[in-house]
Amino acid sequence: MSGNGKVALITGAGSGVGRESALALAAAGYSVVLAGRRGDALGETIGLAGPAGAAMLAVPTDVTDPAAVAALFAAIKAKFGRLDVVFNNAGGNVPATNFGDFTWEQWTQVVAVNLNGCFLIANAAFRMMRDQSPQGGRIINNGSISAHTPRPGSAAYTSTKHAITGLTKAIALDGRQFDIACGQIDIGNAATPMTARMAKGVPQPDGTTRVEPTMDVSAVGKTILYMADLPADANALFVTVMATKMPFVGRG
């Protein structure tokens, strides 16, 4: 059990936002369960945590597989007996494709991870938090700036992230009677391997390609820690953390 007695689960913990959030929670005294498809990458996250890595548990998991998710939560219960915080972060995308050329295979690939996977993790976490003693916990869903505004050629990704907003509200409402809070973090242009392409330029709505400003990914870890540390009677329902100068607010 962690220094603060709390247990957190991070999906997509082998890189980027998930890794940074796991390291931030571990440094703050949480026991952190790392879930992701690649066991070697999860091991690298533990290695980066230093002494705090002793309170981490890596469970290679495909969040789109109900059996794998069930095994993940069985491992959490066996090791820690409870779960206090979930960062439902795992997600994916396909190359930018104009909607007229978007295929069913591309659509289902993105929906499987971003929406179905998010549901499976949140659903299992909800049941565990409802049934444990003391009851309650906090679920944080990764929405993305795309939960508000699309990028060109991103029909599936944008649709799933809009859907996460509805899922977040539904969980927050249904969780009230069980002391389960649910919030959403919308991240814009955190510097990770996934956003490295922005240094070379990304398509804009006007048809041009431009370099976009990014922010250090540590800002996301700090924001997740803030949301996780809130007292049980408070919830950050929606939080946006973004590169200050990215082209999101305003026209163009």
Image (tube, rainbow, N blue to C red):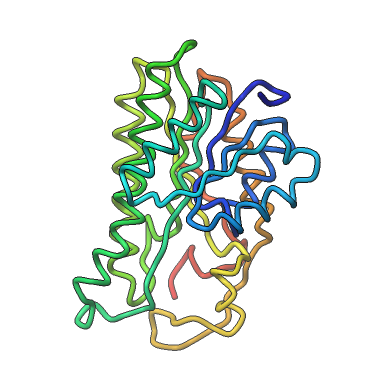
Instruction: Give the quadrant of the C terminus.
Output: bottom left
Residue 121 in percent (x, y) is at 38, 40
Q: Residue furthest bottom?
A: 208
Q: Is residue 203 above or below residue 113?
A: below
Tally the numbered discs.
0
Residue 80 relative to residue 103: left or right:
right
**Considering depth in this image, is 59 or 140 the residue closer to the camera?**
59
Instruction: Give the quadrant of the N terminus.
Output: top right
Residue 208 in percent (x, y) is at 45, 88
Q: Residue furthest top?
A: 134
Residue at (62, 61) in percent of width and height: 244
**Considering depth in this image, is 220 or 117 the residue closer to the camera?**
117
Residue 172 in percent (x, y) is at 36, 29
Q: Residue furthest right?
A: 51
Residue at (33, 51) in percent of width and height: 64
Residue at (60, 52) in percent of width and height: 42
Q: Is residue 109 above or below residue 125?
A: below
Q: Is residue 31 above or below residue 184?
A: above
Residue at (41, 63) in percent of width and height: 92
| Rendered image quadrant of residue 79 | top right
Residue 122 in percent (x, y) is at 37, 37
Residue 170 relative to residue 210: left or right:
left
Residue 20 relative to residue 36: left or right:
right
